[in-house]
Each structure stands twice: as structure tokens, then as C-alpha cells.
Amino acid sequence: MPNDIEKLESMANWMDSRFKLPGIPIRIGMDSIIGLIPFVGDSVTFLSTAYLLGKAHGYGLPWHVKARIFWNGFIDWLIGSIPLIGDIFDIGWKANLKNVALIKKYLPDTEINLRA
């Protein structure tokens, strides 16, 4: 059974870089696809940020890490809500991958094998 961090990494991969665009070396995820629905799509994908915030809080991570996770998700939501420009931005920003990297960086080594 995969540990908690592996599950978070898998979710972030699905949201940010699961699919390769044919003919170009760019990867997209469900965030970019769902984000094509103006405003609503980016609001729905913000739920992944809320989930990661909840996990960070449950791990007891410092407030500044949780603030950074929120900020990454907020920027993704804000700029992602702009039609066309936001869709292009979503492809490069990859907030979920950034946020999981933050969690891994600040999570004490003794808690890396937490179970869901």
C-alpha cells in the first residue's frame, strides 16, 4: 500500500502533468483540462489546494509553509481564471507539484511513511 506522500505525489501528477501533448514536450494535467471551463474549472481545481492544505495542517507543518501552499493555489486560481492566458499559465505553474514538494521539504523524516 503506498504511503501518504506517494498518494499526494500521484494526485499532484494527475492534476499537473499526467498527459503529454503530442508533438511537443509539454505535459498537462487535469488542472489544465478542467481549467478550460472559465472560472468554474479553476474554482473546482482549487479543491486540490484545499486538500493539500488540510494534509499540511494534519502533519503539523508551520504556518508559513501552509501560507505558501495557499499562495501557490491562489495564484493558480486567480491567473487561471483569465480565459486563454490562464490556460497557458496553468500549463507552466503546476501548483500541486510545487505544494507537494513543499510538504516533502518540511515534513520531518520520521513522518514520511504516514498512512492515509
Image: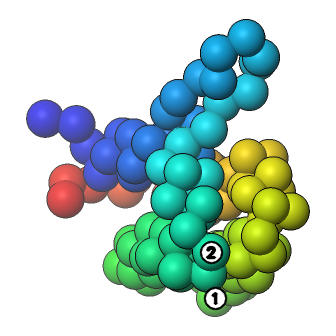
Q: Amino acid at mark 1?
A: Trp
Q: Quadrant of residue 78?
A: bottom right
Marked residue nearer the N-terminal end (1 or 2): 2
On-image quarter of the N terminus: top left
Residue 18 horizontal/vertical position (percent): 50, 33
Under circle 2, the secondary element is loop
Crowdedness of circle 1 by 10 Å Cα count: few (<14), some, many (20+)? few
Which residue is drawn at the image coordinates 80% and 61% (left, top)? 84
Please tell me whether residue 115 is drawn above or below residue 53 in the rendered image.
above
Under circle 1, the secondary element is helix
Residue 38: numbered disc: 2
In the picture provided, is 4 more to the left or to the right than 55?
left
In the picture provided, is 38 more to the left or to the right than 91?
left
Q: Which color mode does the image show?
A: rainbow
In the picture provided, is 4 more to the left or to the right than 11?
left
Q: Amino acid at mark 2?
A: Pro
Q: Nearer the viewer, residue 73 or 37?
A: 37
Which residue is drawn at the image coordinates 60% and 60% (left, top)? 36
> Which residue occupies the extreme top position in the image?
23
Residue 92 horizontal/vertical position (percent): 80, 47
Residue 22 visible in the displayed image: yes
Residue labelled with disc 1: 63
Residue 73 horizontal/vertical position (percent): 65, 74
Please tell me whether residue 8 is drawn above or below residue 84 in the rendered image.
above
> CA separation, marks 1 and 2?
31 Å
Which residue is drawn at the image coordinates 60% and 23% (left, top)? 20
On-image quarter of the C terminus: bottom left
Residue 11 horizontal/vertical position (percent): 40, 49
Which residue is drawn at the image coordinates 65% and 15% (left, top)? 22
Residue 25: numbered disc: none
